Amino acid sequence: MCGIFGIVTEREQMLGALLLEAGRRLAYRGYDSIGCATIDGSGQIDLRKDAGKIDEVDGRLHFKEMRGRRGIVQLRWATFGSPSQANAQPHLDSDGDLVGAHNGNIVNNVSLREEFLAQGMTVRGTNDGESCVHAVERYVNQGRDLVEAIRCAAGDLQGDYAFVVGSSNERGEDGHSPLHAIKKGSGLVVGLAEGATCVSSDLPSILPLTNRILRVFDGEMVTLWPDRVELRRVDTGERIERAPEVFTQGMDAAVKGGYRHFMLKEIHEEPQVAAELIHWLQASPHVTPFLEALTAARRLYFVGCGTSYHACLVGAAYFNQLAGIPAVPVLAPQFRETLARTLTADDAVVLVSQSGETKDVLNALNASRPTGARLLGVLNVLGSTLMHASDHYLPLACGYEISVPATKTYLNQVLLFLYLADRVRAHGDKVDWAKLPDLIATTLESTDEGAQYVASILNPLREMYYLGYGLTLGMALEGALKLKEITYAHCEGILSSEFKHGPLSSVYEGYPVLFVTAPNDAAMMVNHVNEVTCRGGRAIAIAAEDALLRQNVHDYLVLPSASQEVATLLSALPLQLISYYMSVARGIDPDFPRNLSKTLTVD
Ligand code: M6R
């Protein structure tokens, strides 16, 4: 997830070191490129940027030597355009007197670039941050002042983003020059320090300079001067008066965005990352070749480990049920030992891994390669081994996931599979993608209390079962894994109709069994519920409202009403929340559970 920081100071100074420090404090968000721009008192712009880690790039470009009164630093996490010098941010406009950087996604980037090129502008890379700068340039060229130009450009930029920009030609009456920043969907906060003001994607880079913070909301822009800021509405240009707040919590709270743990923060980022992935999938030219390879395959396997494997289970079920395309989910090590041996060049293997570095997944890939089968990667970390080794890949666009338990990356894995299956679906109504992020946000809000309640029921126990059926089998397995991972309780996830084939003997009076149910399976699930309740077990349902199911269970965690496939996806949220609350109630740090590592590079 990219991060931006901009500062305007009273006096000319060596700004590079300050920018570098701000960049370091944005680094926890994840990045693959860094760039700094300074503008001195005479309007001279110094721009240095490249792909690589901060110290590595600083070693080559010597950011600390950069002087100026205004400065911008950007850390880029590549989505549009590969990690490269040209795509690293900040970017210049055609004649080099505007410099700016963004974070977020400009979803109409491809068509905007074509327009800019047709209008004779100098476009140096393929990154969408560059499009923000050219969008402003277009209106500056028409003679508008920078505030006006930014407001007009906002009308041309589709997607969610925060953007900071400065001009070498703009000067106020007091001789100082400003930076401007605009917010639409991505984070942006302003800091008011002594002799300087600054703006950033989030608080950690601001707090070492000041704790006087001004909130900026979507649809607003801010102009920063050394001694003041001006806030405006983007649509009308009308000025907004808002008092700054004093941030009294520490740096740890700031890094966690006010949440107690990264896991909770990352769960609450799910509506946003889902929106970003949907925008990306709708705009990206990478989706069609990926889908073509997938649909042309004679046999199709979805391969992963842990949480990523559970996404494969749900994804394969989507392909089978919605698209009528047979897809087989397989655990990566088992795939290497069995099915990889019978692959042919007509087959395709979708390898799913958040990190893109899981050794078991790479082993499966390496075992598949000699057969000539198509190798398709789904990953979150761009630049990972899986990305480079795949014939085609799709990103999860989640930004950095710090917490060991995968949450937002799992939701986006399932979403990505649903999106692909929906593109080639043979049955039922298409998913309303524009509404899905709001539905995810509503689910988070409406199930939070129920999740705390279910966590309180499960917390005294050392073992339990999660059952799913059809599409929700993968969800039940994932809910059970998440619970094991961060509460240390034993929780087994299985197919609800399998329960009677053995595990049913473990049920005693009050024994809890949780049923994850998609709407069309409610009647079948009631049978499986009754097998448990008639033996004294306590049935807990996670499902959209269903009268029959309600009559048959003891506790009901209600999901918003949605189609079979969307309801399945939504059930991930309360399952993650239950594990989180139970982990915290047990005094465990869910971000760093014992014995586990985020990236497993061993066999
Ligand atoms: O990076 P990957 O998605 O390949 O990781 C696979 C598993 O190690 C991972 O999903 C693990 O199960 C998670 N910690 C679960 O939260």
Image (tube, rainbow, N blue to C red):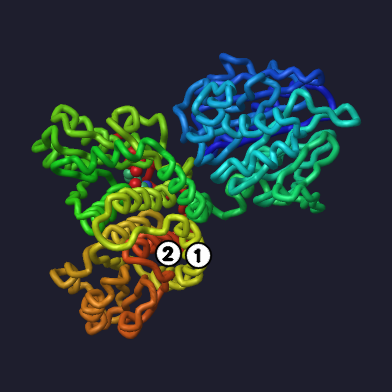
Q: Is residue 305 left or right of residue 369?
A: right
Q: Which residue is mark 2?
A: 574
User: Residue 36's image quarter?
Assistant: top right
Q: Residue at x 22, y 82 (%)?
A: 535
Q: Which mark is residue 567?
A: none
| Up/down of 371 relative to 60, above or below | below
Ligand 1 positioned in quadrant: top left
Q: Position of residue 149 (x, y in %)?
A: 71, 36
Labels 2 and 1: the sequence-earlier one: 1
- Whether residue 137 is visible, yes or no, is yes
Q: Position of residue 517 (x, y in %)?
A: 31, 69
The amino acid pointed to by label 2 is Pro
User: Residue 323's image quarter?
Assistant: bottom left
Q: Residue at x 75, y 45 (%)?
A: 211
Whether the residue under disc 2 has CB within 8 Å of ligand 1: no
Q: Residue at x 78, y 37 (%)?
A: 224
Q: Which residue is mark 1?
A: 442
Q: Quadrant of the C terminus?
A: top left
User: Rounded to the nearest whole Å, what is the CA distance between mark 2 and mark 1?
Assistant: 11 Å
**Front: mark 2 or 1:** 1
- Whether residue 583 is visible, yes or no, is no
Q: Crowding near pointer 2: few (<14 within 10 Å), some, many (20+)? A: many
Q: Position of residue 351 (x, y in %)?
A: 27, 40
| Up/down of 533 relative to 412, above or below | below
Q: Is residue 166 left or right of residue 338?
A: right
The amino acid pointed to by label 1 is Thr
Query: The residue tagged with tag 1: helix, strand or loop?
Result: helix
| Up/down of 136 relative to 308, above or below | above
Whether the residue under disc 1 has CB within 8 Å of ligand 1: no
Q: Residue at x 67, y 28 (%)?
A: 19
